[in-house]
């Protein structure tokens, strides 16, 4: 039953990621494979594990062309890895529960950490979706949430690995497998965090640039030429301001040079 549930969960996440990536851009907007590979490579170079970043995202490059799409794909990869790790550790827990109580407690603690990571990664995936739907003023809130949650996933992963380091669980081979799976979760999550931060920076720069351009285009002169009664009121206020305020003359104050 658990295997069937895990299988269905993974199918759901694979469908959701391809739906997300495909919804952003239609077939006509897809990049050529060489160009897409070059784009993903340029983004993955900024991560801590660039080779892992490339291999884990290679299946998405044919339809992915934006930093947000790569960040979303990376989050899905992290979530799937965490689900696999959780399933394996949960299986080990059940084996130890009736035989080795001490080892069971250690592995159970690790399982709790991984379960927490799965929840946080799932929340992060949903939070990144909200960045497209909510207002720009909410962007900082969602960004902070994702960054905090992904950082917590990394902390949980290393806490799990540190906790089982001093125990020979089921002969040591099982412990090595757990550590390998959890380390993989930490690595892909680290990459996902780096890709998300890169997207967030680009989004901020793009937003400020467009806002600045809008302010330049809609300066006082443009407002003074507004249509209807609103434009008339603006012109009247500007005229009154000019009539009331005396001209400003530059006064030489020697002491200002030392201020």
Image (cartoon, rainbow, N blue to C red):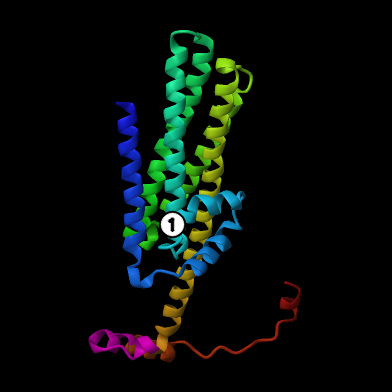
- Residue 191 on image: x %, y %: 55, 49
Q: Is residue 104 above or below residue 152?
A: above
Count of labels in the image: 1
Q: Regarding mark 1 in the picture, which secondary structure is present there?
A: helix
Image quarter (top left, top right, bottom left or bottom right) of the N terminus: top left
Q: Residues within 10 Å of mark 1 (few under 14, many from 20)?
A: some
Q: Is residue 254 above or below residue 23?
A: below
Residue 245 in view of the camera:
yes
Front-most of 203 and 114?
114
- Residue 224 lies within the magenta run: yes
- Residue 239 lies within the magenta run: no
**Residue at figure coordinates x 41%, y 79% from the top left:** 214
- List the residue tagged with mark 1: 60
- Residue 67 on image: x %, y %: 47, 61
Front-most of 228 and 169?
169
**Residue at figure coordinates x 48%, y 53% from the top left:** 57
In which quarter of the view is residue 118 placed?
A: top left
In which quarter of the view is residue 43 placed?
A: bottom right
Q: Residue furthest front?
A: 33
- Residue 59 on image: x %, y %: 45, 55
Q: Main secondary structure of the magenta part?
A: helix
Left or right of 12: which side holds 176? right
**Residue at figure coordinates x 48%, y 8% from the top left:** 99
Front-most of 94 and 132?
94
Which region is colored magenta?
A: 222-234
Image quarter (top left, top right, bottom left or bottom right) of the C terminus: bottom right
**Residue at figure coordinates x 45%, y 46% from the top left:** 77
């Amino acid at each position: 039953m658990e295997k069937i549930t895990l299988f269905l969960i993974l199918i759901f996440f694979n469908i959701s990621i391809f739906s997300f990536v495909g919804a952003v851009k239609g077939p006509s907007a897809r990049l050529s494979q060489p160009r897409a590979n070059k784009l993903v490579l340029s983004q993955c170079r900024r991560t801590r594990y660039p080779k892992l970043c490339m291999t884990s995202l290679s299946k998405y490059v044919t339809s992915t062309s934006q930093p947000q799409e790569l960040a979303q794909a990376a989050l899905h990869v992290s979530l799937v890895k965490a689900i696999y790790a959780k399933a394996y550790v949960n299986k080990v827990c059940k084996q130890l529960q009736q035989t080795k109580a001490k080892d069971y407690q250690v592995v159970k603690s690790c399982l709790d950490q991984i379960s927490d990571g799965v929840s946080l990664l799932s929340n992060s995936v949903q939070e990144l979706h909200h960045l497209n739907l909510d207002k720009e003023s909410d962007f900082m809130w969602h960004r902070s949430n994702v960054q905090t949650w992904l950082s917590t996933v990394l902390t949980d992963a290393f806490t799990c690995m540190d906790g089982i380091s001093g125990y020979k669980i089921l002969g040591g081979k099982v412990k090595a497998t757990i550590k390998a799976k959890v380390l993989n979760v930490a690595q892909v999550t680290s990459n996902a965090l780096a890709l998300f931060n890169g997207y967030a920076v680009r989004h901020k720069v793009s937003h400020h640039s467009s806002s600045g351009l809008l302010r330049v285009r809609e300066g006082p002169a443009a407002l003074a030429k507004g249509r209807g009664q609103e434009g008339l009121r603006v012109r009247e206020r500007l005229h009154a301001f000019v009539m009331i305020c005396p001209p400003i003359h530059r006064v030489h104050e020697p002491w200002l040079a030392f201020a």
